[in-house]
Amino acid sequence: MTDTLTGIDEFKIVGMAAQSKSMFRINLGLFLAELICIPAFIFEIKRALGGNTLSWAYVFEWPLLAGYAVYMWHKLRQDERGEGPHRPVVFDDVDPELDAWNAYLATVHQRDPAATPDERDG
C-alpha cells in the first residue's frame, strides 16, 4: 500500500478545501448579518416604545433584512453544493425581431465603420 496521493485525489482534497472555505465564508456572512440585525432591532424597539415614532419603521425593517440574509444564505449554500434549481435555458432558433435588429446594426456599422460611437451621434 502506498502513502502517496494520486493527482485525482489531490484535486479532490483541494476542491473540498476550497468548498469548505467558501461555505465558511457564507456561514460567516449570515452570522455577521444576524449579529447586526438583532441588536439593531432591539435598539429600535426600545426607541419606538420610548416614543420615537420614526423608529417603528426600523422595527419592521431590521427583521425583514435579517430574513433576507437567511434567504440569501440558503440560496448561496444550495449553489455552493450544486443543489440549486437547474432550469434549462431555451433559446428560439428563429427570432425575426432579433434578426431585423442585427441587420439594422450591420447596416449602421457598414455606413461608418471607422467612426467611434461619439462621432456617429454628432
Image: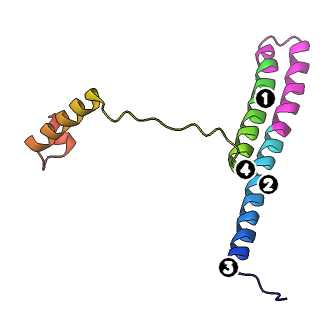
Tell me which residue sits at (46%, 35%) in the image.
90
In the image, 19: left or right of 118?
Answer: right
For disc 3, the neighbor class at 10 Å (few under 14, some 14 to 19, many from 20) is few
The answer to whether residue 50 is seen in the rendering is no
Q: Nearer the viewer, residue 24 or 75?
A: 75
How packed is label 1: few (under 14 Cα within 10 Å), some, or many (20 or more)? Answer: some
Q: Which mark is residue 24?
A: 2
Name the amino acid type tagged 2. Phe
Q: Which residue is mark 4?
A: 81
Which secondary structure lies at badge 1? helix
Q: Earlier in the sequence, mark 1 or mark 2?
A: 2
Q: Which residue is mark 1?
A: 67
Q: Is residue 45 magenta?
A: yes
Does the magenta portion include 57? yes
Choose top left, top right, bottom left or bottom right for residue 92. top left
What percent of the width, then of the height, locates residue 77? Answer: 74, 45
Q: Say whether disc 2 or disc 4 marks the residue closer to the N-terminus.
A: 2
For the residues labelled 4 and 1, the Cα–Cα distance comes to 21 Å
Tell me which residue sits at (86%, 15%) in the image: 48
Q: Which residue is mark 3?
A: 7
